[in-house]
Image: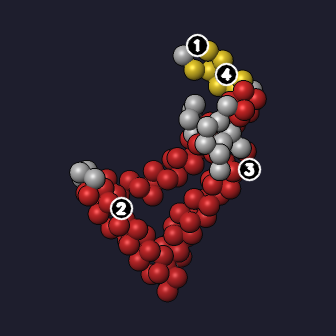
Amino acid sequence: EKNAFAAHGFSVVKTLLGSATILVLAGGLAAGVITGGSSGHAALAGWLLFTVAAAAAIQALGGSPGWALAVVPGFLLNVWITLRSAALCEWRGGIEWRGTRHPLAELRKMRRVRF
């Protein structure tokens, strides 16, 4: 909750654009697989290629390649977490962390990395 919105620089626009991009890519793959036909085959091939690449990367980092099956669902879960983080931070006007309230204006002002 405290870091997902921060990863987008506490920007609602960047959060929405990033989330929409993931939803379009993952949703496009899923829609293509579901609808079938030649577009479904291409989408399935894309999904499998992505999963194989993720498995290779995970294995190269010392993990089990089976975790690659969780990558695309993990992206979708990350969208939910990010949007929830942004909504709560905007609604509350900041972040509560370890009993301390950090106002949103202060968080935006003190960012170290800017995109």
- State how far apart marks 2 and 1 are (Cα): 38 Å
Of the image marks 3 and 4, the number of the one nearer the N terminus: 3
- Residue under pointer 4: 102
Say which amino acid is labelled 2. Ala
Residue at left offset 65%, top offset 36%: 111
Q: Residues within 10 Å of mark 3 (few under 14, many from 20)?
A: few
- Residue under pointer 2: 54
Give the x, y percent position of residue 22: 57, 59
Say which amino acid is labelled 4. His
- Residue under pointer 1: 99
- Residue under pointer 3: 13
Quadrant hosting residue 65: bottom left
Residue 71 appears in the rendering: yes
Residue at left offset 58%, top offset 31%: 2
Q: Is residue 34 above or below residue 21?
A: below
In the image, which disc is placed on residue 82? none
Question: Is the C-beta separation of discs 4 and 1 under 8 Å?
Answer: no
Give the x, y percent position of residue 51: 37, 65
SS type, badge 4: strand
- State how far apart marks 4 and 1 are (Cα): 10 Å
